[in-house]
Amino acid sequence: MDEPDLGLLVDKLDVTRKVRLLTGAAGWRTHDEPDIGLRSVVVSDGPIGVRGQRWDERSTSLALPSPTALAATWDVDLVRRLGVLLAAEARRKGVDVLLAPTLNLHRSPFAGRHFECYSEDPLLTARIGAAYITGVQSGGVAATAKHYVANDSETERMTLDAHVDERTLHEVYLVPFEAAVEAGVWVVMSAYNGVNGVTMSENPLLDEPLKGSWGFDGLVVSDWGAIRSTAPSALAAQDLAMPGPESPWNDLATAVENGEVPESALDLKVERLLRLASRVGALNGGTARKPQVDAPLDLLREAVAAGTVLLSNDGVLPLAPGVKIAVLGPNAATARIQGGGSAGVYPESVVSFVDGLKEVAEVVHTAGVRLQDRPAPLTTANARHPHHGEPGVLVRLLDADGAEVSAEHRFLGRVLEVPLVDGARAIEVHAKLDVDVTGEWTISVAGFGRLTVDLDGTRLVDEDVPLDTDDPAVIHLTPPYRQATAHLEAGTSVDLVARRELRENTGTATVLAADPPRLSDADELARAVGLARTSDVAVVVVGTTDEIESEGFDRTSLALPGRQDELVRAVRAVNDRTVVVVNSGGPVELPWRDEVAAVLLTWFPGQEAGHGLADVLLGVREPGGRLPTTWPAAQQDVPVSNVRPDHGVLRYDEGLHVGYRAWHRAGTAPAYWFGHGLGYTTWAYETVTATESGVRVRLRNTGNRPGREVVQVYVTRPTSTIDRPHRWLAAWTTTTAAPGETVEADIDIPERAYQHWTTTGWTTEPGHFTLLVGPSSATTPLTLQHHP
């Protein structure tokens, strides 16, 4: 479809209407302009699914594995196919723009949003991100490369100033965004943070290199609330302010009238908005494409196995049919499928690790330990509407006198968004709780303002919670809890009513939660040990919580929370066939890793978690993942750990040396290197030879099963006259072979692999480079001298 004459359409608008278009109409959509054939453009958070315009558990979404799990596949075709699935989901929900992928790097494992980013390596991030973008946009839905740029920490994320030298910016942090532009991305999101003294919504990096030498012709949208000025941001290459309708850009008409901002600057921004609208079918009566994906759950199941990394295996895996498995651990029955924050979706169903394994084996289960997690909101499993008894809760808006102004039946006690109406002064969540355990229950309420909870007419909580943050992730997703205890009898039903006051700028998020009494820690651990002792195999699922890995804050520890390490060792003491499954988004310490029979890493695996794990454990599928980030043995060894700004400034003093590069420079061995991962066969790397475009690697499957190998090529130049990493990833490919089969893999190596950034652009240092070929960044049995 040919692009319409956008300049002609812009000329039909006066300044007031141009200004109106440049700020969102609401939280998740832009303004329409019928006179020029423009409908509203709808946006939605990603990246693991398409939530839509509201946080509403009644509107479910398909939930993919986390971005880190996608990068662990090292499989650009699979990620592209998952992108097509996301496009189909977007169209099902009436969404035009998906606010993903996140192309920031795993600069440090302490970064809170680690799970939402792909990798510590710029090239792996670039190629996986480009595949995601290509897949999404093939369905006529815009992808959004975010957060441009150096948005790699959560502490003071709204205001921190990242100090990064020019070479490091170009060779590390800008690389994935450049690849996104080359892939044709339609939207780029400017970040909250500043870079080298200038906040990103006003930063010259939006102009050069983004719109300048890279030639990006799409739209630059702000992160939500990231525009804090009128003229300075409007004079920059920032195009759209979100959300709306309130924004500093509402004053742009006055700024134009006063001569602070030329009208021509608005014209360029509106033109880019119209180009986006044309691409997604929102201009001149365009029809949005509606891609179809056959068997989406099968694709999600395939993705779980493809991203699962087998870190170690003494031969216990794959398991033989007919084994009795004790599935233990706090995440086994309620697998953590996604990280916390704005990336969250409501999946229609989740296959837990326990349920997935029950379909193929005899399974016994107990948690073994309890994690100190947030209270559990009411669900359709334990709560009923107080009037008609259907599963769920009643949510009402009340006026200043306590009279009802609106009401709706919801499924969860965690109510993040309620459509507000005039006169609303409070939100009420009301339900009948079915009590199934006798003892001391913990009843909790979350929100800002005055919070109350009544149980059968008796007030348990009455407290005023002041707003103490401007972080939208806290205000709209994780407001603070207040709680009390009450003795309840099994077999009874109690009436619970929670209310929160509505105050300015405090959102609508309200939570009513009820947690039953639990076994003591000693009794729970003893039960797990007993099940492990009488089972053929023990599978212990350990992991993190959304109080540890989430948008809005960084991590302070890489240790597993609670007594999970103790659980692993106690189980291992009675069953030497102990397999540990790590259910976390980023690295955690595994102090028992050399004591157990096998360690598998599933990341946050999405809604098909249990099916995918069952496929891997029983050998239906090979664990296809390779580490996209280095895992430390102990957190004190981490070479890049500063994620907290000093007086507002976060200095990237490590320069080019992030991830495995930093580990090589430090000379400290991690637990597992970038690129590492085992399959169910073994490989011999035999020869490497030069080709016109790269290298040809011959390798042989030396095991007794067919397998897939990720062949990685690194570049090194110890004698360089400039500062360089010890080695850096240049290219990779994947290959498959039958048992005993020899195969040859051709790998193209781009010119950029040998180049470095200077004040005058990219250049190649004269002389030879050494290519290192192998299965990880530390294991490279083949070498080749190369003169680019």
Image (cartoon, rainbow, N blue to C red):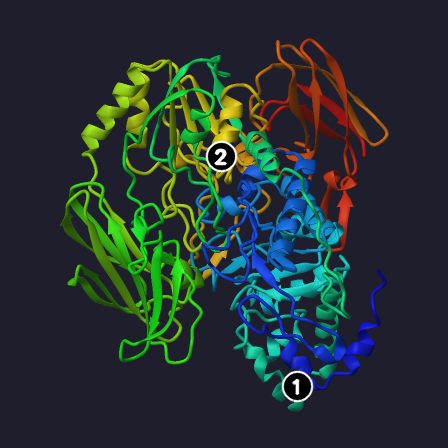
Q: Position of residue 378 (x, y in %)?
A: 32, 51
SS at circle 2: helix
* Image quadrant in which you'd find residue 147: bottom right
Residue at (56% x, 49% y) in the render: 49
Q: Nearer the viewer, residue 151 or 346?
A: 346
Residue 694 lies, in percent from the top left, at: 80, 30
Between residues 685 and 500, which one lies in front from this camera angle? Answer: 500
Quadrant location of the N terminus? bottom right
Residue 314, above or below 247:
above
Residue located 29% across and 53% down the image: 513
Q: Looking at the rendering, which quadrant does residue 633 occupy?
A: top left
Residue 570, percent from left and from top? 28, 22
Numbered tag placed on residue 615 in the rendering = none
Q: Nearer the viewer, residue 459 or 266?
A: 459
For the residue labelled by badge 1, is the local secondary structure a helix, a strand or a loop? helix
User: Type of residue at label 2?
Assistant: Ala
Residue 224 position, x and y percent, is 53, 65
Q: Point out the tag, 2 or 1, that comes first from the N-terminus.
A: 1
Q: Which residue is mark 2?
A: 609
Q: Residues within 10 Å of mark 1 (few under 14, many from 20)?
A: few
Q: Which residue is mark 1?
A: 16
Image point 37% across, 34% down: which residue?
333
Q: Residue at x 22, y 53 (%)?
A: 443
Tell me which amino acid carries mark 1: Thr
In the drawing, does residue 769 fall left or right of residue 102?
A: right
Horizontal relation, residue 517 to residue 419: left or right: left
Query: Mark 2 or 1, which is nearer the eye?
Result: 2
The furthest residue to the bottom: 258
